[in-house]
Amino acid sequence: MVQERLAEETTTAAGRDSGGADLVLDSVTKRFADFVAVDDLNLTIPAGSFFALLGPSGCGKTTTLRMVAGLEQPTSGTLSIGGRDITRTGAHERPVNTVFQNYALFPHMSVLDNVAFGLKRRKIRGAEARAKSALELVELGHLAARRPGQLSGGQQQRVALARAIVNRPAVLLLDEPLGALDMKLRRQMQVELKNIQLEVGLTFVHVTHDQEEAMTMADTVAVMNAGRVEQMGAPRELYELPRTAFVANFLGKSNLVPGEVIEDRGDAVVVNARGNRLTVLKERAAAHHGRVLVGIRPEKLKMMWPQDAAGDPDNMLHGRVADTSFTGVSTDYLVDVPGVGRLGVFSQNHGQQLARPGDEVVLCWDTAHAFGLDGREDSSAGAAEAAEAAAP
Amino acid sequence: MSLLARNRGNGPAADASGKAARPGGKDPRSAGEIGAERRRSRMGYWLILPGFAFMLLFFVLPVFSLLATSLYAKPPGADVGQFVPALQFGNYADVLGAYWQELLRSFAFALVATVAALLIGYPMAYLVAVRLRGRKLLQGILLVLIIAPFFTSFILRTQAWKQILADEGPVVAVLRAVALLPEDGRLTATAFAVVCGLTYNFLPFMTLPIYANLERLDTRLIEAGTDLYASPFQTFRTVTLPLSMPGVMAGTLLTFIPASGDYINAALLGNNQDTTMIGQVIDSRFFRVVDYPGASALSFVLMLAILALVILYVRRFGTKELL
């Protein structure tokens, strides 16, 4: 009931502030001394979407967020919300609110006063009542009189969320809002955040280095690296068809096999990788001639015994198991393919016989699952960053 | 000192840590450990003994001696400085009737000087603690500059103000030139000069506690304020200032209390008619007129008045941590 009331308020309040208010960043650049944090960034974030900026630390995602909030001034470029240029507008004059990484709740105020703070500054009537219903939304109505210091991390996180949402901003910015929570609470909050976003219908821009978090929550993900957007799209699209080695390695794991295009079959190209013929669909390939990287996700690889492998010798690699790790639902294999390198294979547990280190195996896959990248790229780009981001 | 050390945890996590200790139930420690802890806590009492003895000897006993002296009577025909123990409460009425103006003036001067020191000291502390955060060298230099006056004597610095404000000095010349001061106007031997001296001399006592407080201010809270539609001024009023109140309280008390009892500034920079402060009166009662009971009574009145004012002030503006 409370939530319905809030949703109603949203439509009226949002009608004033954020009706069809797309957030647009137009060639935004931010330099700190001799370091380029954000490099000629162009982004359009449609109103009502849940948008994630995903990238390793130092990729410029937080700087981007701070520029949208008005806490940082771009060196060049413009920002606008709903067509209105906000580049030179002060932080306190923008219809934007932030959920800060460490919440930044005011320690000298009650939880309720924290939540009512923004409404009171804008002299909105019934600030306390609205703050109360925002607290109900995050299920903390009963703690309104407490001080933030008396709450747990998860509760503080919700207060920070309520404090931002209650203002019905055109854009809500979330700066790694779940980073300080433990894994279990984080998963739970991911679901809640997504639900709240759907309920209130605000535009959420979420900054995170956690690819799983970005993929579960956002409807559009922009992967950032070194101040630029590497690729942008729906999570599934990014995962199934990465366009750069960085995205392929940072978002999930990828096997990237270097080779040379030797044949054009019309809708596909054939790649020679040390004597193995691999087929890549042209629409799934970033390059159609010369050196390329053929990418296959570990779970798309099928591992067979040599005697079972027959037929089309294309898309088939012979190798030897180097390492296995059994996790119950699945087994992760590392397979050495002579001349190609070490490939990762993720094999679901269907009760099949498990391979052991030293076993000869054959790897094959469906052409529709492979993707092609420019062969000049570093095939390990993003892998180290992904490992770092995954570390707690 | 305790005022200086008091501060609020500004980060939200500040309070969260110490909570989980001992989740109820039986104490898992061995009897030996508990015994050791008891010994340690008894040790604490022994350690505060010297301080306690010092305060007893040099504060509590003198206060009682002062109280007793303030009630002494002068027997008829006695020599100068000869008094007998008595309970002459009329001494208080006498000195209050004679010197209430000086008492009020002292508080007025101290109040103006405290406000002036706050207006000068807070921005200084803010600059060093918040604006220059992370620039250690610059912060260090400015802090040394704030403390540097302490390296010369109090009297010498007050004498220097006499020169600065002298009739032939630069300040008077400029003020006369822009007609803020009449041709024959002067600054020395005025209330203005006394308040200038007080403000200057007690400025570090204002600035340093505020600095110590602001230095721990989480600047993300300022960002959160502006993010939530508060203009820079509103952010200061609703976030920065309330969070720095413990520092402001400490600074204002450390300025106001000694300033209201001060007599050097009034003696060196004031005149003998309308700038006399209560400290000067007590001084002359004690050492020139040799009226021990009167001087003691005045000292006691001053002490009680300051105590009352401080309690009122802390009640009104103070934080829970101070009372």
Image: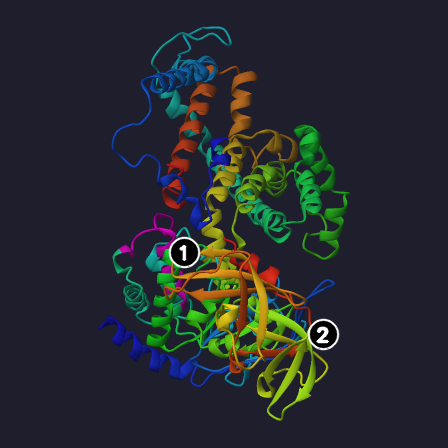
Q: Quadrant of residue B266?
A: top right
Q: Position of residue B320 (x, y in %)?
A: 37, 41
- Residue at position x 37%, y 78% from top? A201
Label at residue A376: 2
Residue A173 visible here: no
Residue reaching furthest to the front = A307
Q: Nearer the viewer, residue B314 or A60?
A: A60
Chain of residue at mark 1: A
Q: Are marks 1 and 2 in contact (CB under 8 Å)?
A: no
Q: Position of residue A262 (x, y in %)?
A: 70, 84
Label at residue B177: none
Q: Note whether B19 is above or below A327 in the view shown.
A: above
Label at residue A183: 1
Amino acid beneath label 1: Met
**Left or right, B201 with reference to B319:** right
**Left or right, A320 with reference to B245:** right
Q: Verify whether residue A158 appears in magenta.
A: yes
Q: Note whether B89 is above or below B318 in the view shown.
A: above
Name the element at disc 2: loop
Chain of residue at mark 2: A
Amino acid beneath label 2: Arg
Q: Quadrant of the C terminus of chain B?
A: top left
**Crowd band around label 2 with a 10 angstrom C-alpha radius: few (<14), some (14–19), many (20+):** few
User: Disc 1 to disc 2, how far (Cα)?
Assistant: 38 Å
Q: Quadrant of residue B210?
A: top right
Name the element at disc 1: helix
Q: Note whether B17 is above or below A315 in the view shown.
A: above
Residue A333 visible here: yes
Could you tell which of marks 1 and 2 lies nearer the N-terminus? 1
Q: Quadrant of residue B71?
A: top left
Q: Nearer the viewer, residue A127 or A298?
A: A298
